[in-house]
Amino acid sequence: MLEDIKGWLPVDAVVVGGRPGLMWMEMSGVSLTEPFFQQTVERARRENRAELFTEFDVLLQLEKQLESVQPSGFIFHSSRCGSTLVANACRAVSGSIVLSEANAIDKLIARFITDADTPVKESLYSVFLRGVVHALAQRRTYNERHLFIKFACCSFAQLERIKRIWPAVPWLFLYRDPVETIVSNIRDVPPWLIDNDRRVLSSIIGHASEMSLEELCARTIGSLFSTAYKLANANSMLLNYNQLSVPVIASVLNFFNVSLSSEELETITRTSEVYSKEVSGTRAFVADVDAKQKLASDLVREMSERWAGEPYRLLENLVNRVNP
Amino acid sequence: MKSDLIPGKHVVTTDFDGGEGIIVDLNTKKYYQLNETAMVVWKGLEKGKSMGEIVADITSAYEIPADHATSSVQRIVDNFQTYKLLGAS
């Protein structure tokens, strides 16, 4: 059976018949070109590709059999702050694999919160997470040289556990003015903010009671800012949305130990001019700082200042000290 | 002299966090976490080392007397057998 599963990718972490495990899809010849991994999975699903459920132990066996690419860089973010633009730039690097918010990765990270109540389970989920990344980063064309992983925003709260698995991998944290971030999330509410299982968000904000979306969002991004402030070190890079430009993105890739060719830089310049999350890549990018600020309600401003204002300023001061 | 005990074909192991490891019994789907010493023993058995050779690995890696190492290795191997993780060579 393991011979048969080469070329398959774990596309989701699921529970089937009470058994936790992975859903795999036959992905031979499928390039991960869409801005998000799950968009690629949906495209493949429309081709009626075969799917298969296995328990997690398959990962341990595949780790010994599959050749894969080690991570070059991790991209973390506080939501709606340009991380997809950076991930798309990574995709322009020749021989790159970019795993952008892959369900199997971020759901396993969430299980650190929901299931890993003992040190043994924590180790187990760490091994599974390493195995899922190994399987997703398998060499399918043998031209692969770099692996970049963009995590879902809530996964940043588990940075210490992730770093325990990959201590040497450089990581980037992207963030943005909290007022603008909250406005964006309230206007187009993402799944992480409306998730019925509030254990993940409760763990991040340390509070479980009902509250407005504005407060929930403000508390969450404030907590993520604090995590970045606490854990930033020489192996990390902090980047504000308002600093994003092609030269800055190129410096991120240099930080990930990638030397860009002129062709790659040209591709990055071209892709950064379109809206980063659209599959077709035809919708133009429009800077929206002013628009977001104008749309902010009094409640957004109040929650932003109360829960995220101080952590944001601390982060900004830290960045200014590191990069005067 | 080689040990006549080897890891079962139904068992998969992986390193984690320095010297520790996780093993899974594919028959029962049970997972076991091994500490550094147990991992040294397991790897020794994988290489077909004798109990004496594994004890020597332990005493060279950790500053403990040979008799302590011998009893530790024996206890760990007994546990592997209790959980049916070993097969015969």
Image (tube, rainbow, N blue to C red):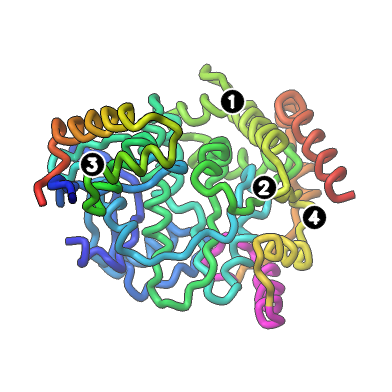
Left or right: residue A249 versus residue A41 is: right
Does A277 appear in magenta?
yes
- Local crowd size for mark 4, using a 10 Å CA cut-off: few (<14), some (14–19), many (≥20): few
Q: Position of residue A133 (x, y in %)?
A: 42, 55
Residue B72: quadrant of the picture: top left
Same chain? Circles 3 and 2: no
Does A228 appear in magenta?
no
Q: Residue furthest top?
A: A209
In the rendering, which numbered label is found on residue A205? 1
Look at the numbered disc 1 and give the secondary structure of its residue. helix
Q: Nearer the viewer, residue A253 or A87?
A: A253
In the rendering, which numbered label is found on residue B51? 3
- Local crowd size for mark 1, using a 10 Å CA cut-off: few (<14), some (14–19), many (≥20): some
The amino acid beneath tag 2 is Phe
Q: CA distance from mark 1 to mark 4?
A: 27 Å
Q: Which residues are magenta?
A: A261-281
Q: Provide the residue designation for mark 4.
A: A243
- Local crowd size for mark 2, using a 10 Å CA cut-off: few (<14), some (14–19), many (≥20): many
In the rendering, which numbered label is found on residue B65? none
The amino acid beneath tag 4 is Gln
Residue at position x 78%, y 42% in the image: A293
The amino acid beneath tag 1 is Ile
Q: Chain of mark 1?
A: A
Count of numbered tags: 4
Q: Chain of mark 3?
A: B
Left or right: residue B9 versus residue A61 is: left
Q: Chain of mark 2?
A: A
Same chain? Circles 2 and 4: yes
